[in-house]
Image (cartoon, rainbow, N blue to C red):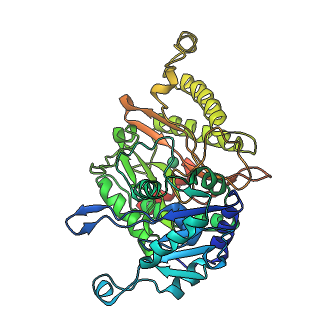
Amino acid sequence: MRYDPINPALFKENRERYASSLLPGSLAIFNSNDQFPRSNDQPFPFRQNSDLFYLTGITQEKTILLLYPDCPNPNLREVLFILKGDELLETWEGHKLTRIEATGISGIKKVMFLDDFDVILTEVMVYAENVYLNSTEYIKYFNPVPYRDLRFISDLKEKYPNHTYKRSAPVMHKLRTIKSEEEIALIRKAIDITNKAFQRVLKSLKPGKFEFEVQADIEHEFTINRAEGSAYYPIIASGKNACALHYVSNDQLCNDGDLLLMDFGAEYACYAADITRTIPVNGHFSPRQRACYDTVYRVLQKATTLMVPGNTIDKLNQEVNKMMEQEMISLNLFTREQVSAQSPDKPLYSKYFMHGTSHFLGLDVHDLGSKYEPFKPGMVLTCEPGLYIAEEKIGIRIENNILVTENGPVNLSAEIPVDPDEIEKMMNAYLE
Ligand SMILES: [Mn+2]
């Protein structure tokens, strides 16, 4: 792996917190992600299942974790199953984890090979009353592709129809929304690497550069700084492209006079950064661009102050929508009178600001957590107001990563330039 080794105490604590949430007599099983086929014998790059990583730190494919805190057989309370790296496999794919190495990463003493899984499963199923199984539960998850967890659930239920089955997802959601010190340090590292990429763009952007060249600059910096790569496919959108919220073709020229919106984040040790910056391609904001930028920047600063314990994403969205509405009147996008006459189902601001202001951030870029869940110390969220005026080729979003604490919000991305004067100064220092 590219990242510095992580103290296995992190994963051990996570397992203890998970285990203490289970009912007595409960077994829990976690599977790694599938290796999704790309073509023929070629899989897409493997990314570990975030929950399995959270509990083990293991990034290798085909890994299974079995937790059974009060198992009558004390040897089977915590078992990790890994792929057996035989000579043939290692000739083709290189080194696979040994059992000792897997213990070193995860802190799990009992590591077995996958071939033993069925025998052990048969034994623990006889003792267990409840079985906690994992699956992806996310409010916007509509992916119809069946994955490893789903196949495992249906196989197990077919073989053992009389057990009581429980969902792991709500337990994991509760645990993963509150980040430990170690996790915050890893997110900070991902953000630091993302800052390095932004600095590189500030130095190298000029009119006539393609969006994919900017993407290459960003990904170069990610990779040489030990990120696994991007935590999500980067959005590099100049001019009107920035008004398509999930624009990812990144294939157009950055023209003189346009803005460039970049939504990008490194993934370091499976933890994500999620940053957006919008800068003028030629190093100078036009007066109108500057007025729009100042609007979003002002709303970003005000919204950040609302990220305090007890508030929710839902309430934050409502506040920010109100702020944006007022700002849009000042920008002459519509009038106060038009607002009074607007339909509540389709408020006028939603034409120019059509997404939420915040989401949880962690092992997943859109991390687990509900928009109705009150903020608590240790939560990490994005703050990302935007303004999209397609008819003026202006699309601006500014996104920071915020840690909620008892003493107020901490901007983890405070080092990444955001002040428009500072951005112009830095770009022009390089252009001269
Ligand atoms: Mn985001």
Quadrant, the C terminus: bottom left
Query: Above or below — where is 209 with respect to 10?
Result: above
Viewer-nearest residue: 89 or 311: 89
At x 54%, y 53%, the residue is 162
Is residue 432 at least partly visible in the picture? Answer: no
Tell me residue 243's x, y (percent). Answer: 39, 37
Q: Position of residue 111 (x, y in %)?
A: 54, 81
Q: Where, by quadrant of the figure, is residue 385 drawn? A: top right
Q: Is residue 67 visible?
A: yes
Q: Position of residue 161 (x, y in %)?
A: 49, 53
Residue 316 at x, y = what percent?
65, 36
Q: Is residue 412 above or below residue 324?
A: below
Residue at the image position 76 percent from the left and 49 percent from the top: 408
Q: Residue furthest bottom?
A: 87
Taking the spot 41% from the left edge, 71% from the top edge, the residue there is: 61
Compared to residue 278, the image places residue 118 above or below, namely below
Of residue 56 and residue 300, the one placed in the foreground of this image is 56
- Where 218 sits versus 279, above or below? below
